[in-house]
Image (cartoon, rainbow, N blue to C red):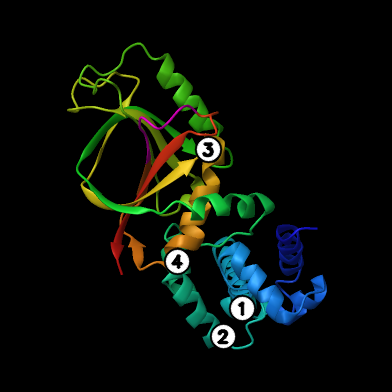
Amino acid sequence: MNNKDVICKAIEFIEANLKEELSVIDVSKEIGYSYHHFSRLFHGITGLPASEYILKRRLTEAADQLIHSRRKSIDISTEYQFTNYETFVRAFKRMFGITPSELRKQSFVYPLHRFSRLRQEDIRYRDTIRGIEPQIVERGEIRIVGLVAVVQQSAHPITEAWSRLFRETDLPASRNVPEKYYQLGFWPTNYDMNGFYVMCGLEVERITEIPLTMTAKTVPPAKYIRFIHKGLSRHVSFTYKYIYETWLPQSEYALTLPYEFEYYGSAYQGPDNEDSETEIYIPIELI
């Protein structure tokens, strides 16, 4: 069993005991490592301390309970081993930026920096992702014409939208040539219940004479953090998970606008090419 397998085993134990009394010492004993050796190994492989992983997972599960149930906040906090409710509220606000009561009043889901369970695939991809430094860039207004899909449980609507776009013969006359392709993701405040929207399209110089089968969006000028996803397009979710659940919460930046987009430039070599590069842009500002 290699080190990454050991950490995966530790994560399985943590996930099975989120509602139980659990310390990092308990986890290290479960896998047969000393506390100090396990702590260093966990941090080195996942990028965060084991105690922080446990806390973030408990808070994320508690947040989901707050959104999807009518149980009292104090009962949920107790279930996830917060013996003091005020401690729970402070930790919740520190992680999500709002209190449990504010979350329920607003039903405002997207800005929550959820931290979902790390799986073997996440750990394997993190070495690659962490080796690519993001850049702060500014982009002017971008006009995109294309097709919109609603995404809930499956990414299939995105694949279908791209297929439909490439079958289109009536493309906008004002499109840039050669074409510049974008995938714009945007969401309502209650996206957790109803999914989010993805627009697959191409950049145009002006929004005029839009084909009847298409729609148009204007992305405003903004400052972005730009990440490069290298590899298969179907694995881009691992990069997004790293950005939103690890990099962004540990950075000095916050989200500013309810959208993100991917740009497929000259380094993009197709969805099934391991060497393909996708540019990911997320609007941010200094905290």
Is there a contact, CB below 8 Å, between mark 1 and mark 3?
Answer: no
Residue 47 rendering spot, x and y as whole percentages: 56, 65
Q: Earlier in the sequence, mark 3 or mark 4?
A: 3
Q: Is residue 91 left or right of residue 251?
A: right
| Label 1, label 4: how far apart the Cα atoms are | 22 Å
Q: Nearer the viewer, residue 221 or 60?
A: 221
Give the label, 1 or 3, closer to the camera.
3
Query: First in sequence: mark 2 or mark 3?
Result: 2
Q: Residue at x 46, y 61 (%)?
A: 247
Q: For the residues carrying marks 1 and 4, which lies nearer the camera in this image?
A: 4
Query: Magenta stretch: dominant SS?
Result: loop
Contact, mark 2 vs mark 3 (Cβ under 8 Å):
no
Q: Is residue 114 above or below residue 276?
A: below
Q: Nearer the viewer, mark 2 or mark 3?
A: 3
Residue denoted by label 3: 231
Alpha-carbon span between mark 1 and mark 3: 40 Å
Q: Position of residue 131 (x, y in %)?
A: 49, 53
Q: Which residue is at a point 33% across and 24% down the rendered structure image?
A: 214
Disc number for residue 85: 2
Q: Range of the magenta residues?
A: 262-270
Say if mark 1 contacts mark 2, CB within 8 Å.
yes
Name the N-terminal-most of marks 1 and 2.
Answer: 1
Q: Is residue 26 left or right of residue 186?
A: right
Measure the C-alpha gap from mark 2 to mark 4. 23 Å
Front-most of residues 158 and 286: 286
CB of mark 3 within 8 Å of CB of mark 4? no
Q: Which residue is mark 4?
A: 249
Vertical position of residue 265 compared to residue 120: above or below: above
- 34 lies left or right of 138: right
Asked whether residue 267 is drawn in magenta, I would say: yes
Q: Amino acid at mark 1?
A: Ser
The mark tally for this picture is 4
